[in-house]
Structure formats: structure tokens, C-alpha cells
Amino acid sequence: MPEPARPMQVKNPLNRQPATGLTERAAWKALAGHYQAIRGLHLRQLFAEDARRGERLSVEAAGIYLDYSKNRITDETIRLLVRLAEECGLRERIAAMFLGERINVTEKRAVLHTALRAPETEQVVVDGVDVVPQVHAVLKRMAAFSLRVRIGEWRGHTGKRIRNVISIGIGGSDLGPVMAYEALRHYSQRDMTFRFVSNVDGTDFEEATRDLDPAETLFIICSKTFTTLETLTNAHAARAWSLRRLGDERSVRRHFVAVSTNTEAVAKFGIDTANMFGFWDWVGGRYSMDSAIGLSTMIAIGPEHFRAMLAGFHAMDQHFRSAPFRQNIPILMGMLTVWNCNFFDAQTVAVLPYEQYLNRFPAYLQQLTMESNGKHVTLDGARVAYQTGPVYWGEPGTNGQHSFYQLIHQGTGLVPCDFIGFCQALNPIGHHHDLLMSNLFAQTEALAFGKTEDEVRAEGTPGWLAPHRAFEGNRPSNTLLAERLTPETLGLLVALYEHSVFTQGTIWNIDSYDQWGVELGKALAQRTAPELESADEPQLDHDSSTNALIRRYRRLRNART
Ligand code: F6P
């Protein structure tokens, strides 16, 4: 068996953190003692003792209102969490990120998604070069191209107008674009069709293309590296599908554009590099939806709306960078996640948008949060002695209420929830929106306060049934409220979670910007693919389970008529 790839171990060049581990920090120890003192407190009591708790434990910035009062915290908890953030050097780490220091230590890269939304007047210097003009140059090229497609000036090879855009990518080169398209569909050009292909399962490509005319279809191949197996396999399928109908190699330049950092590979694929939109190694895949990776978003909603989205991102960046920790929305949310996971032992966070357009937001956040903070060693390569990244998951409300909320209300584990809602509906029909929002508010209330057995009995429930109908309550949640889902609000929300992830990663002292955990499976699949494809029976030397699975697959696949 080949040696599994080992994660690189690199010293933290920032060297700003004391050698002691997280759990040895004074603030951590103080939090551990404080947890013992308050873990028995119920939110019923905390609210009863402080009539203004709801307003006090809330904060508003850039049009986003966060109510975090329904967490199992006191003022002392927040004081200690802020102290922990300071002890962990969060202030310095934020400054280091914005200044373009190489805080992605294992890949020796700067982490500068914040430069993607910096106004033209700002300077962000990486290796002696101000990158802001480069960012704006690409944005301008994207805007010009998007407009040409939107007004029908960019035509297909046969002269037909482009009516369909298919974005091919995976991970960060797909989840952001598909989430943003769904989220901002209300603002999209409705006479165009936008689809997204990511899975190497042929069904994804087939279903995305089956009813489309290649003469009217533009493919955007999105891949930072332009080496990703799934994306290149789908890109080649798209090329073949397109050429089957259009027949002429020259059509590729009208029907394929690329978003990548790899000019050579794009050219090799046959895409005219004049139609390539670049980005940079200081943009992580899962932090790239506001780079050229968002080209499909810009075609869908237009450059004006795209710029509004960038302004939202930037407003949250400014808030994160400058607001005091106590009033800082991403920092509060990040620290509350640490509190719930590391002290109350929560393993997951449910993200529950009460907005149908955000139906892919939880899926997008899964990569952002879990690829970033699913790490088992510190920046120095030492095994962590505490839980890191929780599982993020969720569905839009109210659907989840009729599905998994049962477990959140009455299950044995603690599932902290982020509720996201908007005061104005984008599609006001009857009283739908009031019903939707009344459900959001009711859920946060039910989770926090529950219903005791006595209360249940007092309503006439027989004693034997009362335990089944009782709700313990004391289940933590945050509520994020904004006026309306706009491109700007989407930018604010995504940046909020990006910075919350960074806050968590800083406390856990891990590299939130690498993703070595995806490598081993990729390497093993590369070894296995020829074994599945070979015409002759291959010599297998995996473990007995994998060998048997491969043999069975080959036998049954070849038995197909
Ligand atoms: O899953 C690993 C990963 O590297 C992600 O981090 C990235 O977003 C995705 O693959 C796609 O990579 P690329 O844009 O290079 O095709």
C-alpha cells in the first residue's frame, strides 16, 4: 500500500502566538470555570431577570441586525470571549490578513479575498505590487463581456443569440456561483437560462444540456487550477456536445470562455485566452464567488448589481476590520460558535434561511466553513486538543420545520441555529411573508423557552403524555435580520460568514485557508480509475474490501447489455 500523503508541517511565520496551547490560555481557563457556573442557567431565567436582554444582546451594522440574546450566555461570557479573542491575537491576525501577509502558512500564500471588493481608491500591496488595479481591470473586462452577452451582441458561432449559460466548475468554482444565482434570481435576466454542472456523474451534464441548443449556449469553465478532474471531464463533454452540433472547431472560441489562474492549460483546452478571466493565488477557491468566478452571476444580474454585491462585501469587511469586538457581528458569531462547540459540546450548526432564494446558502456555507475549519493540527502541526470546525447544515424555513426541527427541539444533542430572515418580501403574495416570518420568530422562541411538563399538563394533557409533549428549551440560536434580500445584502451575509470562519480558525490556531484533506481521496481515485477502465483484469493490491468492491463493480458493469 502506498504511504498516504502527509500534510506539510510548517512553522507559523507570524510567530505572534505564545507557545502555550489554547486550553492553557488564561481566558480559556476562565471560560471553563464560567461555563461550570452558568451551564445550569435557563434562558427563561436569563430573560426573566433582564427585561432588556433582547435589545442589549443585539447589534446592528451595515443593515444587518444580529440578535444573539438567545444564546446561553451572560455579559460575563461575552467579556471572557472577547478576552479570549484578544489573547489569541485576533486583532493582529485580522490586520495581517488585510495587509496581505502569508497567513495561509502551509501553502505560503496571502489570503486576500477582501481585495476583491476593495474600492479603486484603496491600495493592497502583495509582493510590492498593488493588486487593486488588477482586480478592477478584470471586473471591467467581466462587465464588458457580461453586457455583450446580455444585450445579445456576443453571438454564437452560427450568429444566434446566446440564451443559455452553463457554468462548469466544482467546489469553490461552483458552489458560490450557483448559490449567488439562486439567491439573486429575482434580479436576473429572465429571458436567459443559467445552469451549473459540477458532478463528474454524467447525469449532471446530461440533465443540464438535454433541452438546450448548442448554437445558443455559452459555457464558462471555472477552475482556479484548470486541472480538476471533474471540471475538465465535464468541460471536454461540453466541447464534444457543442461540436457535435456546430461541427466546426472555430466555434469553441464563441461558445467557451474560462475563469482560471492557469493560462497555459486554458489555451491547451482550446479556449481563446482573450476570453479568459483571471484571478490570483491569494484567492482561495471557497472565497472566490466575488472574483471572476462570479462571471455567471454578473451575466445573470448585470454589472450594476454585481458591483452592489461587492459593496456589501466591502461594508462587512470594514465593519470586521474596525468595529470593537463587542459590537463586531462576525466576531460575535465566531466566538459564540466556539462557546457552543467547545464548552457546550455542540457538534453542528444549523443555518436556517427564511428566504426561498437562499435555498443553496447552507450548501455554500458547508464548503466555506468545513473546508476551512475541518482541521486536526495547529499552525505548527501539533495535534489539537479540542474540537475544531463544526458541521454546518440546513435548509430554508419553513420546510425544515416539518422535517428535522423535531431533533433540534427534542433531541438529546445541542444544535445551535442561525436563523436568517428579511423584513420585506421579494414576492409579496397575500400574507405569505408574515406567516413565514412569524414561523421564524416562533421557532427561536420555542427553542429558547420551551414548554415545561407542568405547562403541558395544565393544558389538559394526561400525565403519561406530558413528557412527550414537553420542550426543555434552553436551545441556543442567533437571528440575523435584514430589510430585504438584495445583491448588497448577499455580499454582507457571505462576508459575515467568511470572517466568522476566520475568527473561529484564529481561536483554534489552525490554517483556515488550506485544504489538504481533499488530496488523499483524489490521489487514490487517480490510481483506481485505470483499474476500473482497463480491458484486462487488473492486478489489484488494495485492501481486501476495496479489491472486492472493484471486482464486483467490474463484473456487474461489464454484464450490462
Ligand atoms: O475540493 C478541493 C478544491 O481544491 C476546492 O478547494 C476548490 O474550490 C475546488 O477543489 C475546485 O478547484 P479548482 O477551482 O482548481 O477547479
Image (cartoon, helix red, strand yellow):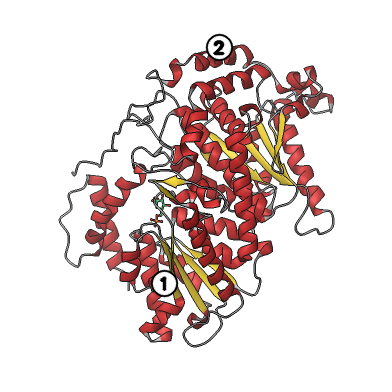
SS label for mark 1 = helix
Name the quadrant of the N terminus.
top left
Front position in the image: 221 or 116: 116
The image shows residue 213 at horizontal and vertical percentages of 51, 81
Place residue 4 in its image quadrant: top left
Q: What residue type is labelled 1?
A: Ala
Q: In this rendering, would 451 be left or right of 86?
A: right
- In the image, what residue occupies the spot 80% across and 28% down? 461
Q: Mark 2 points at which residue?
A: 33
On residue 274, which mark appears?
1
Mark 2–mark 1 Cα distance, whole angstroms, equals 61 Å
Front position in the image: 387 or 24: 24
- Residue 359 visible in the snapshot: no
Q: Farthest left residue?
A: 539
Q: Earlier in the sequence, mark 2 or mark 1?
A: 2
Q: What residue type is labelled 2?
A: Gly
- Residue 94 visible in the snapshot: yes
Q: Is residue 166 above or below residue 54?
A: below
